[in-house]
Amino acid sequence: MKKRYNDIITALLLVGAALFILLPLYMTILIAIKDPSDMNQVLSFPKLLRLENFADAWRMTKFPRKFFNTAFITVVNLGFTIITNSFVAYAITRNRKKSKFFGIMYYYFISAMFIPFCVIMLPLVVQANIFHLDNVMGITFLYVIFGLPMNTFIYSGAVKSIPIALDEAAKIDGANPLQIFWSVIFPVLKPTTATVAILSFMWTWNDFTMPLVLLSDETQQTLQLAQYVFKSQFSVNYNLAFASYVMVILPILVIYIFCQKWIMSGVVAGAVK
Amino acid sequence: MKKKKRGVEPIYYAGVGIMGVLFFLFHTISFLKGVFYSFTDWKGYGDWNFVGLRNYLQIFKDTDTISAYLFTFKFAIICTILVNIISLILACALNSNIRFKNFVKGVYFLPYMLGSVIVGFIFNFIFANLIPAVGQHLGIDALSTNLLGTTSAIWGIIFVTIWSGCAFNTLIYLSGLQSIDTDVYEAAALDGAKGLRKFTRITFPLLAPSFTINMVLAAKGYLMVYDQIMAMTDGGPGISTTSIAVLIYKKGFGGGQFSYQMANAVVLFIVVVAVSVFQLRVLEKREEKIG
Amino acid sequence: MRRKRVFGTLALVLGMTCLLVTGCGEKTKELELFSSKAENADSLQKLVDEFNTLHESEGVKVVLNTPADAGTILKTRLAKNDVPDIMSMGGDVNYTEVQSAGVLADLGQESYMSSIQASYQQMVYDVQKDKEEVAYGVPYATNASGVLYNVDKFEELGLEIPKTWDEFLSVIDTIEAAGEKPFEFTLKDKWTGLCPWNSMAPDLQPDGFTDARLANETTFADTHTEIAEKYLTLLDHAQADFMGTGYDDGNKAFANGEAVMMINGNWAISQFTNANTDFNVDMFAFPASNDPAKNYVTSGVDVLFCVNKDSKNLELAKEFVAFMMEPDHAKQYINEQFAFSAVEGVVQEDAKVDGVKEDIANGKVANFPDHYYPNGFDLAALLSQMSLNHTEGMDRGENIKQFLASCDEKYDISNVQ
């Protein structure tokens, strides 16, 4: 009885997944490999495989450059975010009771979480220009800074749960604050770091708004932005456009397939804190 | 190594200080500048004058802005509710003893990984080409036109938002469900609680923290809806799907209303803070009551 | 020891900041050509390539940048004070915005200026701030907006080119009687809704309306009822899903014979031929009035060039514009784009625009009325709203009244701002 009940749920879930989630993706891939003349039956299997779509889209969107930009932003941001933001959160959390400065900084960062991006969007464009941040390097730098409120919030929750005795033991062994942080605290923070890493990875890889307003130079654009910029040039050729989408989705998909469990538990850990 | 017991190492000041200064320089100054410009008539370049509260007063007279607020609220409320309901159902289903559990979970979380612009474009195609073709084939009138070109365009955007938004919320609920002690259920079973009653009396109250997180994050995110709309309807037909964020971007840059839209942005900021604080207070009170 | 580390960290973070802040200064002789049109990207690219080949030895490179939503992006560039070296755009409000920001070089002394048709240069002056008569922008290509029609279908149905509104209606009737769709509309892309408006308004609005409206001496409500009425009539003969069809999809459908006519401009023709190389298309002036003498071809400056006065490579930028203005290159451009040239002596000979060629040569043209509306007056959204109301079965008279009232309201708001 109970087993049958579970089988019904399984079946419903599978049908739902297939219909709502896999079907659109299946369609995307089909269109990407079809010939423009073969579009009357969108969901039918292609009469012939047209892999030139990928080659054409690759050339048209100048994929390698865009891919490099996006990968650079994502990876460099990840590195700097993890190192700087975790240390800031550690410094703040451990010293809040000792000095008012850290308490103030904590609330300063946290309260910034409530400022929607579109509020600072217009002046940021002006500000970024003054400091020449309207390029790949600049936007990476801004991501590190702008991720601070959320990451401080996530990290400080984790730091709180690490017993202070750990710090003190290391201190007695003669370690300086940086050594304590790096060799004692940072390893313990690993699960939280995974969360922060995933969240910032997803944020920077998929972000559209910030590149849209900041990166107008074509050589500096990201993959997501390129899809928008090339929308009008793909014109009616959906096959090229979808080939291009597939190329953007693919790296993420590969990462997802290999690190699925890790990603899911990371995201949950971040949000429940 | 003689130090005062409560002293703070300078490196901490340095680290936090530097990040604080940088944050101030790029985030806070941008914010303050925005607030400042909202009292001027600056166009984004060139000369400007102070105009006092003119921009703010204009907001209440401008039907475009008012309708953008109405759209944004309607959208945020519907999405927050639907996403939470659907996520909760999905989470309960995924939490039961099903087969291929990890595979199914993996599939449902997939949309979270995809960027909203591409998702928007893909569904744009589905709404414009695939569904009308199917509708015509089956002879169903309601399906044979592009939903995004009708007064119901908002539902197309809501659908896509739910499609990509449920993944995250489901995961949160799922982890909440998994943390519920099985003893509680056994005790409930002894008391004769079953089915829906079991859910409303036991499961749902215990999910309170997850519920709070989901409500607050969802509402905040949907009040700022932007990417999907840019990719799908560009705010149309008419201005029926123009959200506040879209309006700020389009008119702020494109329509020569930079400072006026800054005032609009400041109002949006106040709205978001108010909604978040309100939600937190109400939901936390509820959590306390249960706890 | 500890202090050293503090400084070390400080230096590291500061170094990172400085690196990021300054690490982007150096640039070779690369010039950016910013274009606001997607349709002419291929044609421009060919000419850009040619220019680059000519100047390869000097290390000069022009890079074409054609973003979607170009008008908005150009505004962010202005806000950033990051003006492209060369800009190619329409003679519309976007140009007015850039020009009034005072960032453009005066091109009046360039040698090609003498060969530019005065009427088109005047159109550029007309949209400049205070109608200043300084050549900040040089007209390059001009366009024609009207009714595009499927020549084969017209022959098949034995149709004549209509010269008056009544004839137009009977053409529509004949097409419908034959079981064909008269119009393909593409209102999912709001801007395409402006085309019928721009074609009808010059024929039907009172003389001097633009100036009178600006001075608040007249209103849309008093003068534009007939235009709105005819606009809705056109919609009655469009395909079922005219609100949900996008420009690209619509062009494809039209090129494949799914409708007989489309109200748009010459710039769409290259899209038709992309979708169907054998497509036989021509255009005629929109017969909005029953007085044939009043039915103008709507023609405006489709592409003009302007140059950033503070460009690091100002002379090269000017040289590029001069290169484009050379008759051979102007000819190549208009041939590929089915456009018309602002350069004297460069004539369009393609049969795909036969029907309007004569009117253009004779100057029976009117500029796009929306080029004279204030920036921020989003007429396309209002037209889209009216069309949407129409599909919802709203009462015609009520719909038109509401539409014209909001035209006046929004016009006044954007005129003040």
Image (cartoon, rainbow, N blue to C red):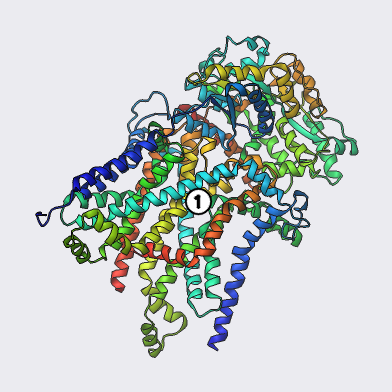
**Where does the image place residue B79, in percent across and percent down from the top left?**
48, 59
Between residue C244 and residue B249, name the one nearer to us: B249
Image quadrant occupied by the N terminus of chain B: bottom left
Say above or below: B154 vs A170: above
Q: Name the one closer to the observer, A63 or A270.
A: A63
Instruction: Inspect the image, locate mark 1, and give the three-letter code of the amino acid beneath it.
Output: Asn
Q: Nearer the viewer, residue C212 or B263?
A: B263
- C222 horizontally vs B247: left or right: right
Under tag 1, what secondary structure? helix
Report which quarter residue C137 is drawn in. Answer: top right
Q: Position of residue B163 (x, y in %)?
A: 54, 60
Q: In the image, is residue A21 above or below residue A56?
A: below
- How many residues crowd around disc 1 within 10 Å: few (fewer than 14), some, or many (20 or more)? many
Quarter where residue C275 is shown: top right
Identify whether A260 is placed above or below B67: below
Side of C79 relative to C296 (left or right): left
Residue behind mark 1 = A206
Please report the residue visible at 71 percent of the width from the left and 58 percent of the height from the top.
B141
* Above or below for C359 versus C286: above
Q: Nearer the viewer, residue C169 or C262?
A: C262
Residue A39 visible: yes
Q: Is residue C70 left or right of residue A83?
A: right
User: Where is residue C65 drawn, in percent x and y?
Assistant: 58, 33
Q: Position of residue C131 (x, y in %)?
A: 54, 16
Q: Chain of mark 1?
A: A
Name which residue lies at 55% across and 71% down. Answer: B104
**Would residue C392 be seen by someone viewing this image from the given angle?**
no
Quarter occupied by the C terminus of chain B: bottom left
